[in-house]
């Protein structure tokens, strides 16, 4: 009944699920784990504050991925960042612009911003959320061109990009640099990370984007799941070391077991 | 609050559908696998309906830009141009469907001509601009300000020479050894770092999936954190 070749995958998925749920519950009971400092995330508040002082807008985007495909986790991570930045913008009175590419992400983003403004007691400004999320185009480069136009015209003081980015990543980051914005970026697309590292002030590497929501909100449930992530990485590390050692000494049983 | 407005309903639906997809991936149960295929087709159809929402939004935003135009600012003309083109191209697509009696508006030659000669060319032009952005970003990034930056500079220089035809000329008789070094750099240290990031991302994706399934991550519902 089990799909051949996926038995070990299922086993490790169950182990990881159990670990995440256990650690989430432990955190909820008050045993809050300590997260290491992530400079890129600490800089978000400073960047929004800078934009407020300079009377310039904050531009934030969740990338060009949607919520219906493999990029969904990155978009969800981006939405967590949008929520946090919108709260800060509402608190400090900074103007927020969140260019959007995917039509079905648009209403989610609008409601996220509106909720954030409501939470900060800025209900009236929150009703303008729809104008803060311009839908540009669902074509990748049309979106990129319109986005570049916004950066060039508005000259934001803070530019935050968290989500799925492809070839447009460097174009956006480079123009952000040229207009003097403090730039914080992170993506799950490994090929784009070097571009963000080269052009941005702060870069969230790999799974740091998934930890961003937990780190910024200090929510015990999310913090617990981040520790679950670390547990998963530790398991992967042990498996790699074991696999290398056993393969080197000619024991193939372990590899065969993992491929089962 | 009425039942359908509560967050519990979409969370329950998400969890149930995610469970179906997981079961279909790991177990060979025909009805569940068929259901999973049907659900994926539904996703495509529903996501495409969102294009209507996009059209309405873009019309609304550009209409507002025209209505609220400021004296001296001529950028509203672009909004007029955009709306005019949008209506024209939409009309052409519908006309194409009517004429060719097919569901494909691209059957209309004018529609295809505009797409191939405007949209595709502009896309390619935009993509090729990337080369210049890469040059300016590299110029800034590849400066030996610290030990780490120096390593980056040396690696980048080696990779550039490895990829450029000039590399073989520069190294002359040692070209093959240099190419072997380039291969090693690309396939060993570079690949190791990439895979480490990929493993982290995969684990992070599973963790976020668990949070979504258990209703602990609600960002996708538009409620923020």
Image (tube, rainbow, N blue to C red):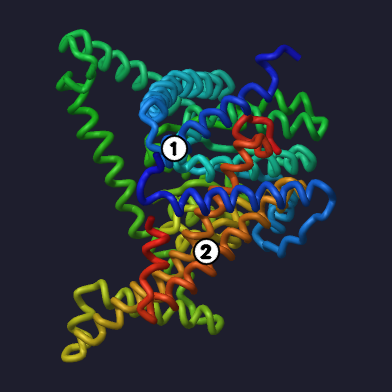
Labels in figure, total: 2
Chain letter for mark 1: A
- Quadrant of the rendering where the C terminus of chain B is positioned: top right
Q: Residues within 10 Å of mark 1 (few under 14, many from 20)?
A: few
Q: Residue at x 36, y 51 (%)?
A: A5
Q: Residue at x 50, y 43 (%)?
A: A63
- Quadrant of the rendering where the N terminus of chain B is positioned: top right
**Which percent across, then down, holds residue B9?**
64, 21
Q: Is residue B39 left or right of residue B90?
A: right
Choose the circle earlier in sequence order: 2 or 1: 1
- From the viewer's side, name the closer residue of B2 and A84: B2
**Residue A139 in sight:** yes
Nearest-to-viewer mark from 2 and 1: 2
Q: Is residue B40 left or right of residue A33?
A: left
Q: Of the numbered discs in the image, which one, if any, rests on residue A69?
A: 1
Q: Quadrant of residue A186?
A: bottom right
Q: Residue at x 24, y 30 (%)?
A: B115
Is label 2 in a helix, a strand or a loop? helix
**Which percent across, then down, holds residue A101?**
47, 35
Q: CA distance from mark 2 to mark 1?
A: 25 Å
| Residue denoted by label 2 | A236
Q: Of the numbered discs in the image, which one, if any, rests on residue A145?
A: none
Q: Is residue B214 above or below residue B88?
A: below
Q: Is residue A236 above or below residue B97?
A: below
- From the viewer's side, name the closer residue of A220 and A16: A16
- From the viewer's side, name the closer residue of B30 and A227: B30
Q: Residues within 10 Å of mark 2 (few under 14, many from 20)?
A: some
Q: Residue at x 36, y 71 (%)?
A: A252
Q: Quadrant of residue A228?
A: bottom right
- From the viewer's side, name the closer residue of B90 and B163: B163
């Amino acid at each position: 009944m089990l799909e051949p070749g996926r038995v070990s995958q299922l086993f490790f998925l169950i182990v990881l699920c159990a670990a995440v749920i256990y650690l989430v519950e432990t955190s909820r009971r008050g045993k809050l784990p300590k997260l290491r400092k992530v400079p890129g995330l600490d800089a978000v508040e400073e960047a929004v504050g800078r934009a407020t002082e300079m009377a310039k807008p904050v531009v934030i985007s969740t990338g060009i991925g949607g919520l219906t495909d493999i990029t969904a986790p990155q978009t969800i991570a981006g939405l967590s960042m949008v929520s946090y930045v919108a709260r800060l913008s509402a608190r400090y009175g900074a103007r927020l612009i969140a260019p959007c590419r995917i039509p079905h992400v648009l209403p989610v983003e609008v409601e996220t911003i509106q909720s954030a403004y409501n939470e900060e007691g800025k209900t009236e400004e929150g009703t303008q959320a729809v104008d803060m999320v311009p839908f540009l185009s669902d074509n990748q480069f049309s979106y990129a061109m319109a986005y570049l136009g916004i950066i060039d015209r508005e000259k934001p003081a803070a530019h935050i990009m968290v989500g799925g980015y492809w070839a447009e990543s460097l174009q956006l980051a480079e123009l952000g640099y040229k207009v003097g914005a403090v730039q914080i970026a992170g993506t799950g697309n490994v090929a784009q990370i070097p571009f963000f590292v080269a052009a941005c002030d702060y870069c969230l590497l790999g799974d740091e984007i998934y930890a961003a929501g937990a780190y910024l909100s200090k929510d015990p449930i999310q913090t617990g799941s981040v520790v679950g992530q670390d547990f998963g990485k530790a398991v992967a590390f042990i498996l790699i070391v074991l696999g290398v050692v056993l393969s080197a000494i000619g024991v193939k049983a372990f590899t065969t077991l993992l491929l089962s | 609050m009425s039942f359908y407005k509560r967050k519990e309903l979409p969370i329950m639906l998400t969890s149930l559908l995610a469970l179906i997809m997981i079961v279909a991936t790991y177990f060979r149960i025909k009805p569940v696998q068929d259901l999973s295929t049907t659900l994926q087709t539904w996703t495509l159809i529903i996501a495409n309906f969102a294009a209507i929402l996009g059209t309405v939004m873009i019309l609304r935003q550009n209409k507002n830009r025209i209505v609220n135009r400021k004296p001296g600012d001529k950028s509203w003309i672009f909004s007029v141009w955009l709306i005019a083109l949008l209506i024209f191209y939409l009309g052409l697509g519908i006309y194409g469907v009517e004429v060719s009696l097919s569901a494909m508006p691209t059957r209309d030659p004018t529609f295809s001509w505009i797409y191939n000669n405007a949209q595709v060319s502009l896309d390619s032009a935009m993509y090729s601009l990337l080369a210049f952005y890469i040059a300016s970003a590299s110029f800034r990034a590849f400066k030996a300000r610290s030990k780490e930056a120096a390593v980056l500079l040396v690696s980048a220089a080696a990779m550039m020479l490895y990829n450029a035809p000039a590399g073989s000329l520069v190294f002359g008789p040692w070209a093959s050894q240099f190419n072997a070094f380039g291969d090693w750099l690309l396939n060993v240290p570079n690949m190791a770092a990439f895979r480490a990031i990929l493993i982290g991302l995969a684990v992070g994706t599973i963790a976020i999936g668990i949070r979504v399934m258990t209703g602990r991550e609600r960002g996708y519902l538009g409620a923020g954190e």
